[in-house]
Amino acid sequence: MTVVSTSLLREALRVLGIERLALGVHDACFPCDPSEDLGRGSPYGSLARDVLRFAAELGFDTIQLGPQGECAPINPSPYDGAAFARSTLSLALGPLVEQGLLTEATCLRLTEASDGARSDHTRAAIAVREVLDEVQVRAQASGAGLEARLGFVATHAGWLLADATYEALLVEHRYADFLEWTDPYDRSGYAWPSDASLARRIEIEARGRSAIDRWVLAQALLHEQHAEFREHAHTLGLSIFADLQIGWSRRDLWANQRTFLRELRLGAPPSRTNPAGQPWGYPVLDPAQPAAVQRLVDARFGKLAAEYDGVRIDHPHGWVCPWVYRPGEDEHAAVRAGARLHESPDLPDLARFAIARVDQLDNGRVRWDDRWVRTLDDGQVDAYARHVDRLVTAFGGAANVACEVLSTMPYPLARVVERHRFARFRVTQKVGLEDETDVYRSENALPEDWIMVGNHDTEPIWTVAARWVAEGAGPRHARYLADRLVREPSDRAAFVERVAADPYALARAKLAELFASPARNVFVWWADLLGETEIYNRPGVVDPRNWTLRMPRDFRAVHGRRVAIGAALDLRAVLGTALRARGHDELARALDPDGV
């Protein structure tokens, strides 16, 4: 394989007009050195630093992380994690040993069972508790870092103190869901003050002091490790993007119960991707309490902006025009019977939250149709955009915000997207070949779009391409790609013949298509980079293998071997192909003489 310099790769990206090339990696997916591996990945360990170097060498300029919040011990989904507290499972052991807070013997004992192949969330959660027990004892004995921790508490008191109390209550109630706690004062989160609730709180804080102190220490260490991770990324020319998940965790709900509607839940309506809808079960912010809601949202956005360089908005319709439902025994039936919170002036129980008027609705459509709302005036758009506007301001402009608009874009969201020129995410493996207007066709991308073959919720392109070939769809996809990638019409038949029956060649061509499109922002999920064939998460499906796929520890060697046989993303080849498609033959030859 020809060795190509990073500077040449970056020049190719510049010529192609690519302004941002992002690599997506969730915390749990990072590889760990055997001496640090508790059974789940961390971005803060020594091998994670090599992932950053590897990405920078390939020309990536951005690392797109997943949500990094604390999850319940039995729920590995980062999208159900806390809005403020960092996941203790991401705590890297190496720095703790260096600081004298953890012994090598403890590391050896807790890591010897992990082979690094897949995440074991529950086992890692148990191991982390033991790590934190030792760290707490040694930190208290030495007094090391006390002044820094006091400063951390002062900076983050707005969420940290309630969070620490919740942690003490979790221990008290054996980590059960707080909605199942039998003590009414514990369950209420002290949201409704009384003499009895205050007495109970004093009792819990006294009895749970050790758990409270351990939690504060853990969060201080995690935030310290994250700051060092981000600083190291910057030295490599990498920006770090957060993932603003649409949900609020049980931890956040407990601490802010009065700010949410009690009877409604947030979900996703039926769509092209999920025809049955998605009953997420997340709490819904109460529009009748605008000051309290804004304080909570601003605190969340402000913390993200202080700790990251940019942000991806997960399911932005949830911030603009949330789909709500009343939970029931049949959750999918309940979510299909739901409605949009601000577009239901005709429903007695939701009319008080309406922004759209009755005369602006198209009652000939189903409620989840993108054109259910037909028109809005500028003042109404201001109301719909209030959260997104503040997020954009927090991050210093729309250029630092990636808005995950997929196949569904209700009219109110479209107006907010237009306001900030967010446009769409183009997931090209979902392309509709029969519809020239399909949003996932690369030629329909706009310069401000983000384009990708897939993400954490889709199969790797290597698996998708193999299925296309097996099902006889290879020639159709190859012909479509020939129009995108082969400049001379007379050369397209040969391209189709070469690619149509070869899953690897078809996958490589799909990756090259990203860089030949009009979109200036390209996203690559790490499994597509490395040539993986297993899916990380099957959305809407309870599967014990969800959220468990990890980068191999020898990821550089794996990538090299697979590139050699055409079974992983070879940036020089796909950029060379994209350059030829755009007429930059000389630079294309310098990168790769053959292309994909």
Image: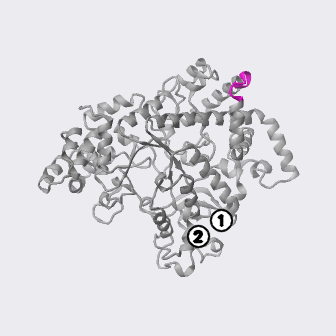
Q: Is residue 63 magenta?
A: no
Where on the picture, by quarter, is residue 75?
top right
For this rendering, which residue is in front, 557 or 176?
557
Could you tell me if the residues under marks 1 and 2 are in contact, i.e. CB atoms within 8 Å? yes
> Of the residues shown, which amino acid type is indicated by label 1?
Pro
Q: Is residue 118 above or below residue 184?
A: above
- Quarter of the picture containing the C terminus is top left
* Horizontal and vertical percent position of residue 267: 55, 60
Whether residue 251 is visible, yes or no, is yes
User: Label 1, label 2: how many angstroms apart (C-alpha)?
Assistant: 9 Å
- The residue tagged 2 is 342
- In the shown orientation, is residue 131 left or right of residue 140? left
Residue at 51% x, 72% y is 367
On residue 105, the disc is none
Identify the secondary structure beneath mark 1: loop
| Quadrant the N terminus occupies | top left
* Residue 339 image point, x, y percent: 56, 69
Residue behind mark 1 = 287
Span of residues in magenta: 139-146
